[in-house]
Image (spheres, helix red, strand yellow):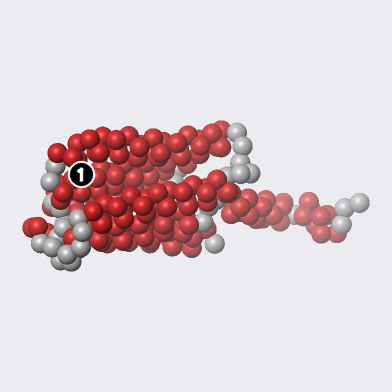
Amino acid sequence: MASKDDESIFEDPREALRLIEREQVNTIREVTPDPRLMYWPWGLTWLISFGLSFLRYGPEGRVLVDFPEWVPLSAMTGLLIVAGIFTGIVGARSGRHISGPSSRQGAMYGVSWSVGFTGLAVVFGQVGESLPEHLAGLLWGGGMVALVGVLYMAGAAIWQLRDMFVLGAWISGVNVIGVLLGPGWHALLIAVAGGGGMLVAGFVGWWRLR
């Protein structure tokens, strides 16, 4: 037998609609990863690794802090691996209740990230050996950031996420400007505007999800 509350819901279409909206919001919260957990690891990775690159390979070849040349690239590689594993786990846990086309889209999108980074790493590993250290760093940094920007924009097109598209476009624009300015300036722009942009995007996404 239906309770009085249930009867009032069915008698009032507006209340029924509000109930449906609440359930939809709760479902979205359950299946949507916390934006802070998805963006902040990458933002901190860029802030630290590109910050180190700026200190070692400053504008016009200046060495602001004299530490071994391998430190920036090694830090970037290690932090990228950690950030990728962490966000992969977070995404997998959030999507464990999703099935069907959406699940396949997410899986294929995740594989695209791995394939893209692996392909660029192989190419840059071969080409970078013939370049000076500061230009090899620009090649790796500019190429990887360009890939991230494009993948964010592609993901936004798949799931119709305007904020994600704006972030991808912002990253792409900052990257192009940085590459044109050259080593040092590129690292500074990506550390501050790129990494900082991801930190802001994570906070804004979390605030809206509330």
Q: Nearer the viewer, residue 23 or 200?
A: 200
Please state the horizontal and vertical placement of residue 160, each as a whole percent of the image.
Answer: 45, 43
Q: Which residue is mark 1?
A: 139
Seen from this angle, which residue lies furthest right?
A: 1
Residue depicted at 55% across the width and 45% down the height: 92
Seen from this angle, which residue lies furthest front?
A: 68
Please state the horizontal and vertical placement of residue 105, each as a whole percent of the image.
Answer: 50, 35
Q: Nearer the viewer, residue 159 or 62?
A: 62
Residue depicted at 31% across the width and 61% down the height: 48
Asked if residue 56 is positioned above or below residue 97 in the image, the reply reads: below
Residue depicted at 19% across the width and 40% down the height: 128
The kind of residue on which mark 1 rests is Leu
Q: Quadrant of residue 203?
A: bottom left
Please state the horizontal and vertical placement of residue 1, each as a whole percent of the image.
Answer: 91, 51
Quadrant position of the C terminus in the picture: bottom right
The number of discs equals 1
Seen from this angle, which residue lies furthest bottom?
A: 65
Bin the neighbour count of mark 1 within 10 Å (Cα to Cα): few under 14, some 14-19, many 20 and up.
some
Q: Nearer the viewer, residue 43 or 66?
A: 66
Instruction: Mark yes or no: residue 188 visible.
Output: no
Please state the horizontal and vertical placement of residue 176, each as a whole percent of the image.
Answer: 20, 47
| Direction from residue 45 to residue 17 in the image, left or right | right
Instruction: Mark yes or no: residue 82 visible.
Output: yes
Q: What kind of element bears circle 1? A: helix
Q: Quadrant of residue 111?
A: top left
Seen from this angle, which residue lies furthest left?
A: 60
